[in-house]
Amino acid sequence: MPTPRLVEPAEAREEPGWGIGGMPGWLDDGSDDNSRRNSNDDGHAPEYDDEEPDETSVVRRRFAVAPPAALALIAIGVIACAIAGFGLFRGTDSAPVVAFETSAGPTVGVSTPAAAHPTVGAQLVVSVVGLVHRPGLVRLPPGARVADAIASAGGARRGADTVSLNLAQLLNDGDQILVGYAGPDGRVLRSAVVAATGSGAPPANEPGTTSGAPSAAPSGSSGSRVNLNTATEDQLDALPGVGPVTARAIIDWRTRNGRFTSVDQLGEVDGIGPARLAKLRDLVTV
């Protein structure tokens, strides 16, 4: 027998409206439960997922404590930043000091030897006389040899005796090179190198003049010979084979180069060749 259905009175029913406080009965959650219950009764599964996280649980998970791996990465980053900052600060402070010490050290060490070398490396002044194209004083660098001095004087003239010279001999400041001749008649006036510390005669270990030349001065009286350093132009003109032009050339050579140190230096005078020098050797002195 069917159960009779009760009918609510009209006063007990709540009509929806804006003046009623709270949630109206027809929008209450109970309706959802009834619908869910009815759907279950019909044999259908619920359409909601119990495992689906709500918004509150998601927010809580985001602000939960980070895992240990993340904490380790953060710690490593902080340490790396601290080391980089310390190294940058330390390098900025020490850079000027290192650069100053490095630049100052070599400057003091190099400047001292540089000032001393120019004093040692002075030029040599050597006199080259005899049968050369440009007799006179030549300036040579330290370590120069006889060959360098002759080349600076224009080279040896034709008939010059270069065999008697040691062309590889080292020179000193103030040395004199006498370039002799080898005459066509077989007579040879040997060349020599006179050291600056010597008395003016060729050294014993250097080839000197011919055997007849040194003995000529003692054999005769010096008063009968014309002194090349004190003779006037007329006295030189009176010598056999010497005319006014040659006498003037001898005076010019003496004015330009100073005193004659050897009779052999007459070979440097223009107009006096080996044959004329051989004739004047016994008639002049220095």
Image (tube, rainbow, N blue to C red):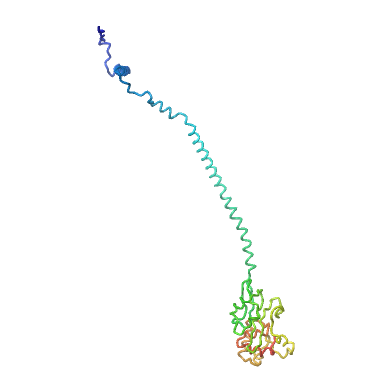
Q: Nearer the viewer, residue 196 or 163?
A: 163
Image quadrant where one finds the N terminus = top left
Q: Is residue 156 something that shows in the picture?
A: yes
Residue 4: horizontal and vertical position, in percent? Answer: 25, 7
Residue at screen point 53% across, 38% down: 79
* Image quadrant in which you'd find residue 227: bottom right
Q: Check the image and name the residue furthest to the front.
A: 43
Residue 128: horizontal and vertical position, in percent? Answer: 63, 79
Relative horizontal placement of residue 4, taking residue 169 as reference (left or right): left
Relative horizontal placement of residue 96, taking residue 16 as reference (left or right): right
Residue 89 against residue 64 in the figure, above or below: below
Residue 285 against residue 110 in the figure, above or below: below
Residue 139 against residue 10 in the figure, above or below: below
* Image quadrant in which you'd find residue 254: bottom right
* Image quadrant in which you'd find residue 247: bottom right
Residue 82: horizontal and vertical position, in percent? Answer: 53, 40
Q: Is residue 24 something that shows in the picture?
A: no
- Count of marks overlaid on the render: 0
Q: Check the image and name the residue furthest to the top.
A: 1
Q: Nearer the viewer, residue 184 or 109?
A: 184
Residue at screen point 69% across, 85% down: 210
Residue at screen point 73% across, 86% down: 215
Image quadrant where one finds the C terminus = bottom right
Relative horizontal placement of residue 170, taking residue 6 as reference (left or right): right
Residue 122: horizontal and vertical position, in percent? Answer: 63, 70
Q: Nearer the viewer, residue 101 or 36?
A: 36
